Amino acid sequence: MTVKRGLTVATILSAVAVLAGGGAAIAAPGGPAAASCTYPADVLDLHNWYEGLPIGEAENPKNVKQPELATYRADPWFTTTADCTGVRFRAAVNGVTTSGSGYPRSELRETDGSKNASWSSTSGTHTMVVKEAITHLPEDKNQVVAGQIHGSDDDLTVFRLEGGNLYVTKGDDTHYKLVTSTYQLGTEFEAKYVVSGGKVKAYYNGTLQTTISQKFSGAYFKAGAYTQANCDKSAPCSDANYGEVVIHALTVTHTN
């Protein structure tokens, strides 16, 4: 059985005029009609995700689950881009963190319908493809995680940008595989993880970067902006100092 969770593009077009009785949207003279969106769920298929935000009470950040997530946005932390081609995830260094981390995040966590997703590296094939751009880094400790596989206790591997160096990590080895040393903020790229047979394959723009042999269970995908800085390691301690990622497409597939 294959379960596929994919991107939906905003399908509502803004109209300059409507044909009488036809209900068809007409493009403005000189160009096509612009896409219209209100919520991140208008751009990405979020049915099998919940969003963790850098707001709320200390060590108890706000999590937004379905069905609330379908009509939820929190500007500027979780919202659409102006052209409706992506979803912006932002986490400032002064953001609320979970009890298990000292860093703030605006990040999607994979679910399986009404419950949290949990799968094994030794059973089935599990794939996440993210088309995204890292658009802003915090000051001083200029690092952000833009997608990851998390295990039952800790992250297993992530795509992590430090300045212009983009890495694929392995456990606590944050510099396990250098993907590129010349990443420019705002550049769209494709990050992909494929997990099967006790191995994790990490791809960058379609090219295999590394294969990590590891058996694990209780795993799930995450995508968004996990800022690797806080007020103790980065100044100023304000909303203006943040990590940010824009996701344009997000697909997860599980095959037994």
Image: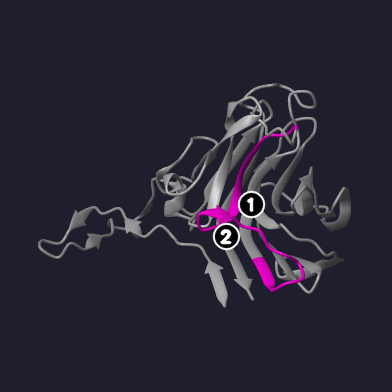
Q: How is the image coloured?
A: one colour
Q: Position of residue 98 (x, y in %)?
A: 68, 34
Q: Which residues are magenta?
A: 102-127
Q: Quadrant of residue 242?
A: top right
Task: Name the one closer to the observer, 166 or 53.
Answer: 53
Label 2 residue SS: strand
What residue type is disc 1 on?
Ala
Q: Disc 1 marks which residue?
A: 223
Label 1 residue SS: strand
The 10 Å Cα crowd at callout 1, few under 14, some 14 to 19, many 20 or more, is: many
Vertically, is 102 above or below 231? Answer: below
Would residue 165 be visible to someone looking at this image? yes
> Is label 2 in contact with label 1 (beta carbons under 8 Å)?
yes
Sequence-wise, the earlier of marks 2 and 1 is 1
The 10 Å Cα crowd at callout 2, few under 14, some 14 to 19, many 20 or more, is: many
What quarter of the picture does the C terminus occupy?
bottom right
User: Which numbered dot is residue 242?
Assistant: none
Residue positioned 60% across, 32% down in the render: 61
Q: Position of residue 209 (x, y in %)?
A: 81, 66
